[in-house]
Amino acid sequence: MKPPPFTYCDPESVDEAVALKCAYGLDSFVLAGGQSLLPLLTMRLVRPEALIDINRIGDLQRIERRDGILEVGAGVRQYALQERPLVGELVPLLPKATGTSCP
């Protein structure tokens, strides 16, 4: 099956994403990874008017130290937590905990 027609939105900022979500309301979905949403679309179990893809929003991809605390953005991928030296430096268990292999 193919997904139903929808408007694809690709905001570049959090403010733009929020404005789009407000404009489309409950008839929209926010796309971050798609592992759950894409099968639902393909099987036509959901039919949103719009998809708001937040993957390109840089502010959500940040991993940084602030006052000795690790701040991880909502859009940071698992592999980034495993790869970035700063993560291991500030929270040594986190790269191991996000790994996919068993010891």
Image (spheres, rainbow, N blue to C red):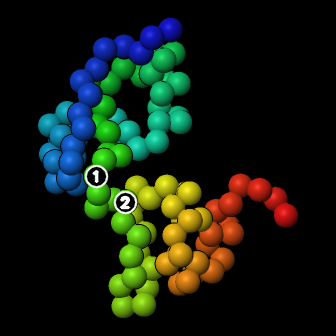
Q: Is residue 9 left or right of residue 78?
A: left
Q: Residues within 10 Å of mark 2 (few under 14, many from 20)?
A: some
**Dot 1: element:** loop
Q: Is residue 59 left or right of residue 15?
A: right
Between marks 2 and 1, how big is the CA–CA gap?
Answer: 7 Å
**Front in this rendered view, residue 21 or 100:** 100
Q: Which mark is residue 57?
A: 1
Amino acid on which the number 2 mark rests in the picture: Gln
Which residue corresponds to mark 2?
Answer: 61
Which quadrant of the rendered structure holds the C terminus?
bottom right
**Residue at the image point whose x is 35% and y is 85% from the top:** 66
Amino acid on which the number 1 mark rests in the picture: Ile
**Front in this rendered view, residue 76 or 52:** 76
Residue 69: image location, x then y, percent:
43, 85
**Residue at the image point whose x is 41% and y is 15% from the top:** 3
- The quadrant in which residue 31 appears is top left
In the depicted structure, whether residue 3 falls above or below residue 18: above
**Residue at the image point whose x is 63% and y is 80% from the top:** 92
Q: Is residue 15 left or right of residue 45?
A: left
**Dot 2: element:** helix
Residue 22: image location, x then y, percent:
17, 42
- Assess whether mark 1 and mark 2 are in contact (beta carbons under 8 angstroms): yes
Residue 37: image location, x then y, percent:
47, 32
Instruction: Inspect this view and state whether residue 28 appears.
Output: no
